[in-house]
Image (spheres, rainbow, N blue to C red):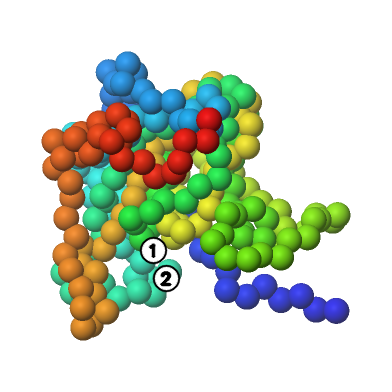
Amino acid sequence: MAVIDILPAPLYVEECPFHAQMKTLFNEELLDVLTDATENLTSRGLLHFDHYCVLDNDKYSMFRSWVELQAEIFVRDVLGLHLPDSEGMLMTDSWFNVCAKDGYQYPHYHGNSLVCGLYYINFDEEDHAPTYFGRSTSLRKFPEYPTLELNYDKNTRYNQLDQVIGKEGTLFLWESQMVHGYKTNDKDNRFTLSMNFMPTVMTNGSYGWKVGKLKPEERKSYYQTFKAGGVWDSPDIR
């Protein structure tokens, strides 16, 4: 019997050459915004700081340029997608995540982006939970069409989660539709920065548009409307 893997999903990994400087800056900012944390409703012990775009601050311009360059390399050289000359990748969103001991991140994916990014600011490879990526065969979905379901009685690489242990100062990039999360965390202060990226120009040669960033006041207004219940992305199941 032969089993051949086809159509693998790429995970881009790159270490930041100036991580020590960034860790200091990010930790200082975290102390300033702790009172604005929002608890994730589906992931125990996980705090988000998504009311603003962290990397919009000019003090992060070097890091922002670096992650956008890595996203461009990932899209051009790994995914093989065409980006028009003089156009690249735009970091559209960035937010802090802090997970306490015994916390976890529920499996999810990111909408309104082409590429997701994760940067490990404070990460203990021994005790902080590694990020996993799941296939549709290993995670139950809620499709709007009839499904056939069978249970499992044997673990294989095709019905389990793939965990990848990063390390502090490492950037992960992957296609935004990939489901990801992490299991129970064994140590406080798992501190990461999440990001979304889009090409500055979306075009198939015939149709397209330019991508721009939300202004800080726009982002804050949309965030406040969402948190106040003015709009929602799922029904109330609590």
Q: Quadrant of the rendered structure where residue 169 is?
A: top left
Which residue is drawn at the image coordinates 39% and 30% (left, top)? Answer: 48
Q: Are marks 2 and 1 in contact (CB under 8 Å)?
A: yes
Helix, strand or loop at mark 2: loop
Residue for point 22% across, 43% down? 62
Residue 9 falls left or right of residue 23: right
Residue at coordinates 71% horizontally, 65% vertically from top-left?
148
Residue under numbered circle 2: 79
* Residue 20 can be seen, yes or no: no
Residue positioned most to the bottom = 206
Name the spot of residue 225 as percent of width and height, x first: 25, 34
Query: Toward the viewer: 67 or 179?
Result: 179
**Mark 1: secondary structure:** helix
Residue at horizontal 51 percent and vertical 63 percent from the top = 10
Horizontally, is 9 left or right of 163 in the view?
left
In the rendered image, the vertical position of residue 173 relative to residue 131, given as above or below: below
Whether residue 97 is visible to the viewer of this picture, yes or no, is yes
Q: How many marks?
A: 2
The mark nearer the N terminus, 2 or 1, is 1
Label 1: few (<14), some or many (≥20) within 10 Å? many
Q: Nearer the viewer, residue 70 or 188?
A: 188
Q: CA distance from mark 2 to mark 1?
A: 6 Å
Which disc is residue 74 wearing?
A: 1
Residue 176: image x %, image y %?
43, 57
- x, y percentage for residue 53? 25, 38
Q: Amino acid at mark 1?
A: Phe
Determine which of the numbered discs, if any, sits on residue 37 in the image.
none
Give, as a three-letter code, the residue at label 2: Leu
- State the image quarter where residue 9 is shown: bottom right
Q: Residue 210: x percent and y percent? A: 16, 65
Q: Residues within 10 Å of mark 2 (few under 14, many from 20)?
A: some
